[in-house]
Image: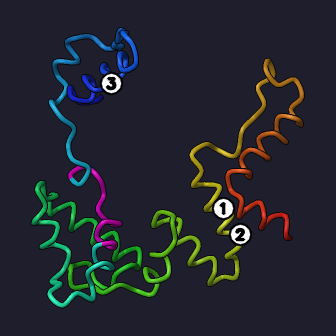
C-alpha cells in the first residue's frame, strides 16, 4: 500500500487543473493503517549499487575511509545489516575483493561500472564478452531491460492479422532501441 502522505498528494492531482473528486478504492479502515510517510529509499532498497558508486566516486580522495562512514552520516542511515548483506552480495558477485569496506574494486566492476544497466545485466555482458558472445549479450540485456516485454501475442478480437501485429510490435520495440536496430541491420 501507499502512505497517507502519498494518498493526500494523489488526491490533490484530482483537482490540480479544475475542480475534481478523488475516489479511493480502499476502505477507510485500511487507510487508517497506512504509515504517515513512506520509508526512505535508502532504508528499503538493496545498497549494492550505492556502495559501488560511492567507492568509485571517493576512492581517490585523500581522506576517504570507506563507504560505511558516509552511509552512517546520512540523515536516515541504513541498517548496517543491510550494508553487510550488500557487501556479501558484491563479494559473491566478484565486484569487490573482500566482503567488507576494505575490499577494492575488481576488474569486473571497473568494466561494468560504466554500463548503464543493472549489476546482473552488466555481469552477463562481461562474461559473454569473455566467451566471445558480447554482441548477443548486449541484445539480450537491452531486450530484458525494456519497460514492456518484447514478447507479445496478438489478441484475436483486436488484431485479426497476427503477422501484421507482430510486425508492428517488432518495429515499435526495436524503434525504442536505435542502437540495437542498427546492430541487427548491419549483420
Which part of the image, by quadrant, shows the C terminus? bottom right
Which residue is label 2 attached to? 136
- Give percent across and percent down for residue 179: 71, 64
Which residue is label 3 attached to? 10
Which residue is label 1 attached to? 140
User: Which residue shows up at 53% across the image and 65% down it?
Assistant: 121
Q: Which residues are magenta?
A: 43-53
User: Which residue shows up at 31% across the image and 78% down it?
Assistant: 57
- In the image, 62 versus 145, the foreground residue is 62
The magenta stretch spans residue 49? yes
- Give percent across and percent down for residue 150: 69, 46
- In the image, 60 versus 139, the foreground residue is 60
Front disc: 1 or 3: 3
Colour mode?
Answer: rainbow
Q: Are marks 2 and 1 in contact (CB under 8 Å)?
A: yes
Residue 24: which quarter of the image?
top left
Secondary element type, mark 3: helix
- Give percent across and percent down for residue 165: 83, 34
Amino acid at each position: 500500500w501507499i502512505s497517507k502522505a502519498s494518498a493526500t498528494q494523489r488526491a490533490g492531482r484530482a483537482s490540480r487543473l479544475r475542480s475534481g473528486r478523488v475516489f479511493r478504492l480502499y476502505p477507510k479502515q485500511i487507510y487508517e493503517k497506512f504509515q504517515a510517510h513512506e520509508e526512505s529509499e535508502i532504508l528499503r532498497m538493496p545498497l549494492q549499487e550505492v556502495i559501488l558508486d560511492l567507492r568509485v566516486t571517493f576512492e581517490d580522495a585523500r581522506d576517504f575511509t570507506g563507504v560505511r562512514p558516509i552511509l552512517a552520516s546520512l540523515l536516515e542511515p541504513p541498517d548496517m545489516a543491510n550494508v553487510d548483506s550488500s557487501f556479501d552480495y558484491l563479494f559473491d558477485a566478484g565486484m569487490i575483493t573482500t566482503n567488507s569496506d576494505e575490499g577494492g574494486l575488481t576488474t569486473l566492476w571497473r568494466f561494468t561500472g560504466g554500463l548503464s544497466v543493472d549489476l546482473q545485466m552488466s555481469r552477463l555482458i562481461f562474461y559473454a564478452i569473455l566467451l566471445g558472445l558480447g554482441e548477443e549479450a548486449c541484445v539480450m540485456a537491452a531486450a530484458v531491460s525494456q519497460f514492456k516485454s518484447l514478447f507479445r501475442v496478438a489478441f484475436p478480437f483486436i488484431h485479426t492479422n497476427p503477422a501484421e501485429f507482430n510486425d508492428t510490435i517488432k518495429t515499435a520495440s526495436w524503434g525504442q532501441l536505435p542502437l540495437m536496430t542498427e546492430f541487427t541491420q548491419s549483420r
